[in-house]
Image: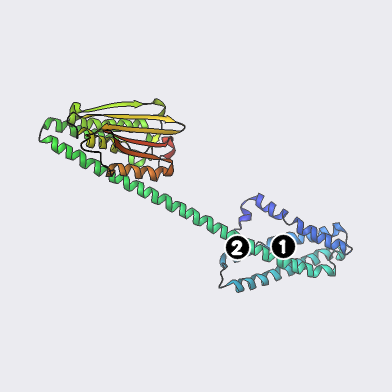
Amino acid sequence: MHPLFATRRRLILYLLAWTPVIAALVQASARGGARALDAVAVFAPACLVFAFVCLSPWQICRVRPLTPANGLAVLTTFLAAGTAGSGLLLGMAYGIAYAIGRPRAIGSNLQVLLLVLGILIYLLSAGLHYALLAAEASAAAEKRATEARALAREAEMQSLRLQMNPHFLFNSLHSISALATIDGGRAREMCLRLADFLRSSLGLSDRELIPLREELALARSYLEVERVRFGDRLQVEEVIYPECEDCGVPPLVLQPLVENAVKYGVSGLVEGTVIRLAAMCSDGVVEIVVENAFDPEMPAPERIGMGLENVRRRLRVRYGAAVGFEAAGQDGIYRVELRLPCESPMASIKRA
């Protein structure tokens, strides 16, 4: 079906666009001595029918796309169709004029004008139809490209999520293995806390965003797992502003940060360290900071490890240039800072 028939408004506007053509023919007829009302009675219905004839290029344009190789053949087709349409326009105008008894409305001066005007309008209609089809093809291509980018983005996000769990489980199991040779009871407790953490994280793969309060609860759960291993050497301080707890963040985005703090802070210092978590909101941006001390004689790694690089890539894929990520060690303190838009977690729940 032609796009003009999709809505009544489009069809009415299209028919109204023929008003100047009818007015020009009426004026030309009046110059030949015909009355304006007689000319309107002849040309208005004839042009109305021809207006629908000029919609026929839609199907031809769809069947025969315009290319440099077939340009001449397509032009010949439309010239023939336009000539036939113009003949129909002239024949209808004569038929109506004689039917209402006003043959003077069609003077000899209008015959050539009707034929030439009809051909030109038909060719113009064909050109507009090709332009419309080209615009539709461009929009469809853009839509496909957008969908492809979205699918690629989702595939990368899913890949990064799948990378995270094995990395985290490997480190946790390694810790349990090391602890089991020292204190079997504490190793068992660590296994139970690890099971609690994994249970609480089930189903997160179906959610793009979760409230920051849930993400903080998962980070605390992970730290409880490690506290079994390190005891009082691992201390946690939090400064969390309540207004940012409803901001949506990607699931398990904090866990690699606190894992990094444990790996390079707590385990590297005999006396342990304090892991500081802070979160604040300002102007629609939530800022999250994770800090820990490290041994100055063992500088913090210059290259970001796999866990932090995973977080950086996830945030870049999810937010693009709107995200900020900084990780650096200075004066014995390693600091990781995230800045991301404060979104509603309900806006990005994935549909099954």
Q: Position of residue 306 (x, y in %)?
A: 27, 44
Mark on residue 254? Answer: none
Q: How crowded is mark 2: few (under 14 residues within 10 Å), some or many (20 or more)?
A: many
Residue 234 placement, left or right of 106:
left
> Toward the viewer: 56 or 212?
212
Dot 1 falls on a residue whose secondary structure is helix
Q: Distance between the residues labelled 1 and 2?
A: 19 Å
| Picture residue at 59% right of the left edge, 65% below the top | 61
Residue projecting furthest to the right: 33
Q: On the image, numbered disc 2 is attached to which residue?
A: 130
Q: Residues within 10 Å of mark 1 (few under 14, many from 20)?
A: many
Vertical position of residue 44 compared to residue 159: above or below: below
Q: In which quarter of the image is residue 192?
A: top left
Mark on residue 50? Answer: 1
| Picture residue at 85% right of the left edge, 67% below the top | 107
Q: Quadrant of the C terminus?
A: top left
Query: Which dot, 1 or 2, sits closer to the camera?
Result: 2
Please name the amino acid that badge 1 sits on.
Phe
Q: Where is residue 160 in the image (x, y as percent from the top left)?
A: 32, 46
Vertical position of residue 282 compared to residue 163: above or below: above
Residue 56 seen: no
What's the image's color scheme?
A: rainbow
Q: In which quarter of the image is the N terminus?
A: bottom right
Residue 25 placement, left or right of 339:
right
Q: Position of residue 290 (x, y in %)?
A: 31, 33
| Picture residue at 82% right of the left edge, 58% below the top | 40
Please name the amino acid that badge 2 sits on.
Tyr
| Picture residue at 86% right of the left edge, 61% below the top | 30
Q: In which quarter of the image is residue 325?
A: top left
Q: Where is residue 204 in the image (x, y as percent from the top left)?
A: 33, 39
Dot 2 falls on a residue whose secondary structure is helix
Residue projecting furthest to the left: 181
